[in-house]
Amino acid sequence: MPANKSVLVLPGDGIGPEVMEQVQRVMGWFEAKEAVSFAVDEELVGGACYDAHGVSITDETMDKAMNLDAVLFGAVGGPIWDDVPREHRPEAGLLRLRKDLDLFANLRPAIVMDAMVDASTLKPEVVKGLDIMILRELTSGVYFGEPRGEQTLEDGTTRVVDTQSYTEDEIVRVLRVGFELARKRNNKLHSAEKSNVMETGAYWRKIAGRVAAEEYPDVEFEHILADNCAMQLLRDPHQFDVIVTDNLFGDILSDEAAMMTGSLGMLPSASLGAEDPVTGARRAMYEPVHGSAPDISGQGKANPLAMLLSFAMMLRYSFDLGTEADMVEKAAQNVLNEGYRTGDIMQDGCTQVTTEEMGTKLLQELDRLSA
Ligand code: NAD
């Protein structure tokens, strides 16, 4: 059996623990098959951590996040913590993880499984078989640039400022992740910016072109304006494989691409940090795109597939276990093909299942696939 993979499990609040429980069953399945062995450390995060320790993440947990191989994150937040001071809000724990681990590369796949083709608001012939990846720069750009905020002008009126800023290194490192991803997929990368109207866009384009020519001549590469990219995603998404873009455009384009696939309960994500120059390992965190869904928590209604598909991304990107990741993804597809659905993706003629039943169906599929 391959050496222990150390994983920090942070279930969080609301449906977070419910969907994470299904992942832990799948980890147990892999261990029972002696396929992979996980060394799991489980800690509180978000509102649950605030209730226990008065902070949304403890320094001890941060220490583990910095030192273990990967972090699996459920979801945080809920109305009962609405009055908690801003610096201790449940979301602060998530932001601290992203910031301190320097998770600059956010990977959001948009995959339309055949069984889910009708869940998209786009025509089936446009989205059928879709499998693209949006790569968003996550730790710089206009969400972090200084100066920012309101200023009072001499005439007493107000001016408000955000600053879009990127360094050469910040652009190069996320571009490299994009090219490496493309090489492992269909070898095609689009870099999206607004070079026609923004200084940062023109610089981004220059650097992207240089990295493409000097380091990745084998990858098919194209520049695209971000507004055209948004349009082309709806017109003909199959023209794309990997799209790399900045923090702001990535926020928008990844939500647009994700919603082609139907439901929030199906969307995984990965956030990667810099490569260790000696070991080649990257800090990494895997989490579903959805939140803690307080409206359905505790009722067995949560769809665990986004969390399970995030776990599959962890197998692929942190542990290089592509075969095992494929198995989890295939098992999820088969369960859907057999017509099992949680409430959020329920369709006529399908069988509605609970969170736990969905986990059980997935384990049965894994048994079948490995037989
Ligand atoms: P949400 O994603 O929690 O829920 C939006 C809607 O989608 C709800 O109707 C919910 O029931 C449904 N939904 C979400 N995930 C589902 C799943 N797996 N299965 C079935 N249905 C699902 O977003 P929200 O309602 O805007 O936010 C609720 C709380 O979650 C807030 O406190 C918010 O701050 C927090 N939040 C956390 C994260 C995170 O931890 N990464 C992300 C987004 C929102």
Image: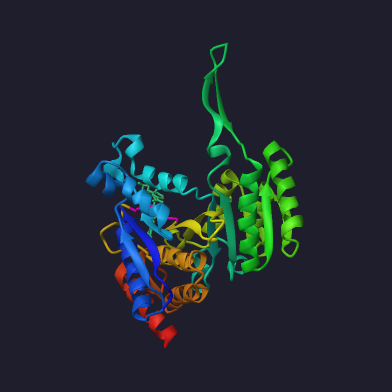
Q: Quadrant of residue 166?
A: top right
Furthest residue to the front? 278
State yes or no: residue 90 in magenta.
no
Residue 260 visible to the viewer = no
Prevailing secondary structure class for the magenta stretch in the rendered image? loop
The percent coordinates of residue 277 (x first, y second) are 57, 56
The percent coordinates of residue 256 (x first, y second) are 56, 53
Pick the front one: 173 or 159: 173
Furthest residue to the bottom? 371
Pick the front one: 182 or 303: 182
Identify the residue at horizontal 28%, vertical 48% (top origin): 49
Pick the front one: 354 or 31: 31
State yes or no: residue 292 in magenta.
yes
On screen, 152 above or below 199?
Answer: above
Furthest residue to the top? 155
The total number of labels drawn is 0
On screen, residue 17 versus residue 224, left or right, reads: left
The percent coordinates of residue 57 (x first, y second) are 33, 46
Magenta residues, as a range? 289-293
Q: Quadrant of residue 286?
A: bottom left
